[in-house]
Amino acid sequence: KPRPEWTATEEFLTRTVVHPDPALEQAIRSAADAGMPAIEVAPNAGKLLMLLVQLTGARRILEIGTLAGFSTIWMGRGLPPSGTLVTCEFLPKHAEVAWANIDNAGLGEKVEIRLGPALDTLAALEEEGREPFDFIFIDADKENNSRYLDWAVRLGRRGATVVLDNTIWEGAVLNPDMDPVNAPGIIEALTLLGEHPRLDATVIQTVGSKGWDGFALARIT
Ligand code: SAM
């Protein structure tokens, strides 16, 4: 769990460097008010997502796991005027809170929330014959991580960016007994990232308000 000095340092960095805007701060408040879990990305990670979207020139984003729309808004902020973002969420209450936050952030025209189990939505997106995505952020049920990676490769264009959150899980990647529900899916996805013929990846460990965790960054080749 987070050490106080990790959280204090993150707060200092958020204040001095990251500068989340009022709509992002409101998204955090609304989630707490609605009794939703505080499992969104940290502000510095959210801003990293925004910068990655901008640096890669992504125009079409796919997100798996919306919660209250915090990461959605960060990534949406990085999109060009014609950019779009599809985000998958299966809890109606989360989608409702997220929609209010996304609209409040001025991103209502760009963002589509797809309600339902993400695996169904991903199959539907393929059926619909959408243009391939440039940027895919995976942050939902960890059991399905490797299935989501497979879908990312199917729905993303060559050269697209894939970010997979929660890759260390307090060290459970080395001790899966710490969390028999989530650790196996995380480990399976890391193995797939290392072996997949169409993914080139690295993994970064992080500490902060979310404890000891990390994310994977991959390119579809
Ligand atoms: N990306 C968000 C952020 O950083 O602000 C946090 C997402 S939270 C970690 C995971 C979300 O995925 C939750 O809102 C949960 O309800 C949703 N979720 C979990 N399993 C899902 C599934 N199979 N299909 C769709 N959504 C799912």
Image (cartoon, rainbow, N blue to C red):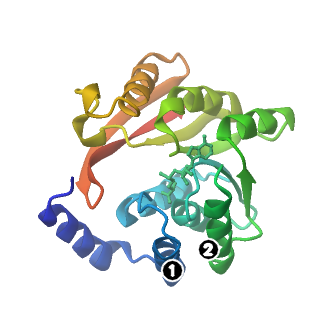
Considering every residue shown, the one lying at the far bottom of the view is 22
Instruction: Please name the residue that numbered disc 2 is placed on.
Output: 101
Evaluate whether residue 197 shows in this view. Answer: yes
Taking 99 as reference, is 125 left or right? right
1 and 2 marks in contact (CB < 8 Å)? yes
Task: Give above or below for 93 relative to 131.
Answer: below
Amino acid residing under circle 1: Gln
Q: Position of residue 105 (x, y in %)?
A: 62, 77
Would you say 21 lies left or right of 103 here?
left
**Foreground pick, 35 / 167:** 35
Q: Nearer the viewer, residue 202 or 169?
A: 169
**Of helix, strand and loop, which one carries label 1?**
helix
Q: Residue at x 37, y 61 (%)?
A: 42
Quadrant showing the C terminus: top right
Res. 79 in view = no
Q: Which residue is mark 1?
A: 26
- Answer with left or right where residue 84 lies relative to residue 186: right
Where residue 145 appears, as percent x and y from the top left, is 51, 32
In this picture, is 176 found above or below 1? above
Label 1 CA crowd tier, 10 Å (few <14, some 14–19, many 20+) = some
